[in-house]
Amino acid sequence: MNMRLIRAAQNAVALDALALMNCDAQRVPHRTNLVVGGYGATDLADITLEAQPIAEVRKTFAGPAFACLGG
């Protein structure tokens, strides 16, 4: 699915946490490990968004929940 979005951030962990594929970033083990290691944030309360609201662009992808690892 082409979402026709350009995503950019100073912190890749925070960018990935925006959950544009409708997957809770705090449920994905490698993301949690990055937060614990001090590489970024996955809690949306800690992320400043300067764009369209997530709810306007979020999509649910068909197929297995590979991105959510059980979600």
Image: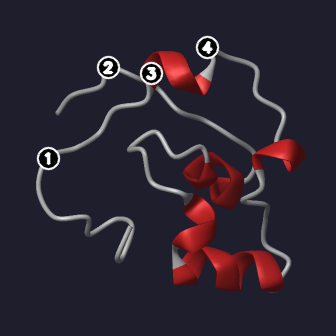
**Tag 3 near tag 1, CB within 8 Å:** no
Q: Which residue is mark 2?
A: 4
Q: On screen, 16 above or below 59? A: below
- On the rendered structure, is 66 left or right of 43? left
**Which residue is the site of mark 4?**
52
Q: At 78% from the left edge and 72% from the top edge, which residue is drawn?
A: 39
Residue 57 has which mark? 3
Question: Between tags 1 and 4, which lies in front?
Answer: 1
Mark 4 → mark 3, Cα distance in angstroms: 7 Å
Is the residue 49 above or below the residue 4 in the image?
Answer: below
Find residue 66 and report its horizontal and vertical position in percent: 26, 69
Q: Alpha-carbon neighbours of circle 3 within 10 Å: few (<14), some, or many (≥20)? A: few
Residue 57 pos. (x, y %): 45, 21
Relative to residue 6, is residue 67 depicted above or below?
below
Quarter of the picture containing the C terminus is bottom left
Q: Is tag 2's residue or tag 4's residue first in the polypeptide sequence?
A: 2
Q: What amino acid does circle 3 point to?
A: Val
Circles 4, 3 touching at the beta carbon (< 8 Å): yes
Where is mark 1, residue-wise?
Answer: 62
The kind of residue tagged 4 is Gln
The mark nearer the N terminus, 2 or 1, is: 2
Q: CA distance from mark 3 to mark 1?
A: 16 Å
Residue 21: quarter of image: top left
User: In terms of depth relative to the viewer, which is nearer, 23 or 10?
Assistant: 23
What is the secondary structure assignment of the residue under circle 2?
A: loop
Q: Indicate which label's residue lies in the foreground, 3 or 2.
A: 3
Measured in 3D between alpha carbons, the distance from the residue under mark 2 to the one under mark 4, in whole angstroms, is 13 Å
Q: Amino acid at mark 1?
A: Ala
Question: Where residue 69 appears, x then y in whole percent?
Answer: 36, 76
In the rendered structure, the answer to whether residue 37 lies left or right of residue 54 reads: right
Camera-side residue of 24 and 13: 24
Identified at 88% across, 48% down, the residue is 46
